[in-house]
Amino acid sequence: MRLRPPRRDLVVFGPPAEPANRSDRYSALQYIRPARTGRIRRLIRIGALVTVIAVRPRWQPLLIGTTLTVLGLIERQGVFGVFIVPGLLLLWCALLTPGDTGADHERRCQLKRELAAFSTPAQRCDLHATLDRYPDSITYEIRNILADQAVASHNNGIPGAGH
């Protein structure tokens, strides 16, 4: 037993025997073949995947810009048509943001692994006391990683919400 092939040319209303008069409101409906969207959807999915992979550090403005631009294009004539301009500006900002090189990404991963060793509250308190001796412009990366680790390890009490 095998699967049936998809039915692409399903006709709900057949074409009329003679062309319908456009002035007649209740004439037979014209059959319009829908456009094939499979290729377009596949290209959109592949493009989104390549975009996410290629622009690792700038994914947030890119995601927001894409969402606002698509919403603005869909609702061009409505109120949400105003979102095209901020969406395009965020896309432009994502293009101008410099990306991480492979060495920067590897260095950040190594730093995360080293900071994960400070797991007890006493160790973290000592580390924060050491970081307080230096300006934030120097220690911002370490502070961001520690804040992300603290949020990830916090139990919020909601069952099923993760650790």
Image (cartoon, rainbow, N blue to C red):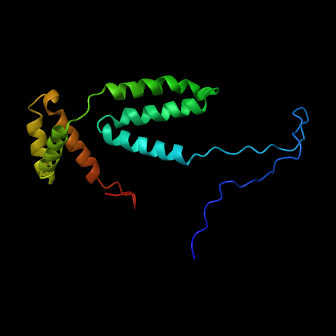
Q: Is residue 9 above or below residue 147?
A: below
Q: Is residue 116 above or below residue 75?
A: below
> In front here: 126 or 9?
9
Residue drawn where x is 13% and y is 28% of the image: 135
Residue drawn where x is 59% and y is 33% of the image: 74
Corner quadrant of residue 78: top right
Residue drawn where x is 47% and y is 43% of the image: 43
The picture places residue 37, in percent across and down from the top left corner, at: 58, 46
> In front here: 109 or 39?
39
The picture places residue 71, in percent across and down from the top left corner, at: 54, 33
> In front here: 57 or 141?
57
Corner quadrant of residue 96: top left
Q: Is residue 17 above or below residue 159?
A: above
> In front here: 58 or 52?
52
Relative horizontal placement of residue 13, taking residue 137 as reference (left or right): right
Quarter of the picture holding the N terminus: bottom right
Quarter of the picture holding the C terminus: bottom left
Relative horizontal placement of residue 98, taking residue 36 as reference (left or right): left
The picture places residue 30, in percent across and down from the top left corner, at: 80, 43
Relative horizontal placement of residue 20, taking residue 53 as reference (left or right): right
The picture places residue 33, in percent across and down from the top left corner, at: 70, 45
Relative horizontal placement of residue 146, taking residue 40 as reference (left or right): left
